[in-house]
Image (cartoon, coloured by chain):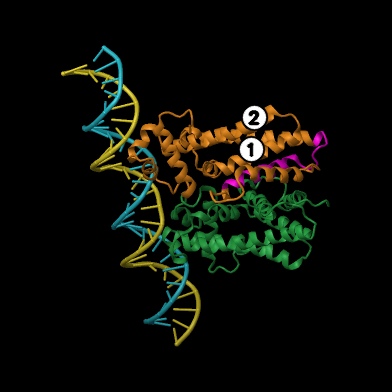
Chain colours: A orange, B green, C cyan, D yellow
Amino acid sequence: MTMSLTAELWPDVQPEAARRLMLAGVESFARRGYHATTTRDIAGGAGMSPAALYVHFPSKAALLFAISRSGHEQTLALVEDVVAREQDPVVRIRMIVEDFVAWHARRHTVARVVQYELQSLPEQEYEIVAELRRRIERIVREVIADGVESGVFAVPEPRTAARAVLSLGVDVARWYTERSRPTPTALGQEYGELVLRMLGTKTS
Amino acid sequence: MTMSLTAELWPDVQPEAARRLMLAGVESFARRGYHATTTRDIAGGAGMSPAALYVHFPSKAALLFAISRSGHEQTLALVEDVVAREQDPVVRIRMIVEDFVAWHARRHTVARVVQYELQSLPEQEYEIVAELRRRIERIVREVIADGVESGVFAVPEPRTAARAVLSLGVDVARWYTERSRPTPTALGQEYGELVLRMLGTKTS
DNA sequence: TCCTGCACTAAGCGCTTGCTCAGTCGACAT
DNA sequence: ATGTCGACTGAGCAAGCGCTTAGTGCAGGA
């Protein structure tokens, strides 16, 4: 039995109409950008009148925040899960890249909003997602630094290497589309290989 | 004798007031995004009244196009110059990455607009810069494919590898700021090393 | 001295924007 | 039957938007 896309993306958001607004917001924000999207676009996309948006969200910015926070929490959870499950830095990095890249390809519409529209958030809301981003970056940096210390990685600057690893993942949201090849999972694996070599590992 | 920043960025744009408008546009577009920027912001940033913008550009979109086309032409020239100067795929890729990354770091404000605001261009103008982007991507892909054929690189998919290389460069514009370390040149060199390893070269 | 043309401004037009408000409708409890 | 409450609509307001228009000032040529 298949779930609706909105329920899969935001299982804890109630009622369903709020989820439909988030989905319509994602589609519009991803295609046109936050500021080029009107509340009429969003409400229309969810099959409602403009005023209905304000039954479920106090403002257009609050809708963006709900989308952005949820997306950041999901990607952070991805990374944290890998670290909780695995110990070896090589395995950790490979799986982080595989999951992170596959998520950005599979959810490229949501990911585009998450990664490229956060500058449109009000200051307070921006700070909350910025903190989530810092936690993601710190984990990746520490995994790399771990690997350098134990000798399985060889990079001069873990900080720069972490930036590069995350850049590869984030940027997938910019260019990946429905018609892109390879599949999200396969892209994740290819990128996993590339990253391991980039970090100086000899393995395949 | 130092040149003004506008003359350095757009030496062939006349008169100087038009360059000042482009600079003000770049700053606003980079910070707030194209649609969140008003013609009053731009004109004010250039020290003029709103109407003065229309003396030099037929529309706000035309100003964005001037900025975007110029930036794409500059980065394409960067890549073409390296290919014209060097023959060895390893040297070519290293220098392309060094120059491309350094440009995106040094000119991060312009680069942000060039890389992330092109979706706001009208269709015709978008197609022109899209063609420039395709040329950049094709060159990088062919240099990598060359290296794979001659055995100095080892990647399963030159297309995917080219995407990864360009992603690293493009994404610099997203996170690099005035306060970032290392310097643009040093970052280019670090990324050059990372990319060569990513592509399966043994050298340092 | 007058004329021409360019760069620029003050004022404002028509339209769209985010958001509000008064009221409708149906589900459900009493 | 009646009352209550959450979800929703139609109409519209104040503010801000891209852009236009009429006119000013000034540099350079005849």
Q: Position of residue B159 (x, y in %)?
A: 66, 55
Q: What range of the chain is rendered magenta?
A: A148-173
State whether residue A30 appears in this view. yes
For numbered disc 1, what is the local secondary structure?
A: helix
The answer to if A172 sits in the magenta stretch is yes
How far apart are labels 1 and 2 at the CA level? 10 Å
Using the image as rendered, state which of residue B146 and residue B193 is in the foreground.
Answer: B146
Q: Nearer the viewer, residue B45 or A10?
A: A10
Q: Amino acid at mark 2?
A: Asp
Tell whether A97 sits left or right of B190: left
Q: For mark 1, does the 10 Å Cα neighbourhood hold few (<14), some (14 to 19), or many (20 or more) residues?
A: many
For marks 1 and 2 on the same chain, the one whose residue lies earlier in the sequence: 2
The foreground one among A132 and B109 is A132
Q: Secondary structure at mark 2?
A: helix
From the viewer's perspective, is B68 left or right of D25? right
Chain letter of disc 2 in the image: A
Q: Label 2, on which residue?
A: A81
Point 33% across, 38% down: residue: A51
Of A85 and B5, the residue lying toward us: A85
Whether tag 1 and tag 2 are in contact, CB under 8 A, the answer is yes
Q: Quick check: B98 above or below B10?
A: above
Q: Amino acid at mark 1?
A: Asp
A87 shown above or below B62 = above
Report the number of discs: 2
Residue B83, by quadrant, is bottom right
Q: Is residue B188 above or below residue A49?
A: below
Q: Which residue is mark 1?
A: A99
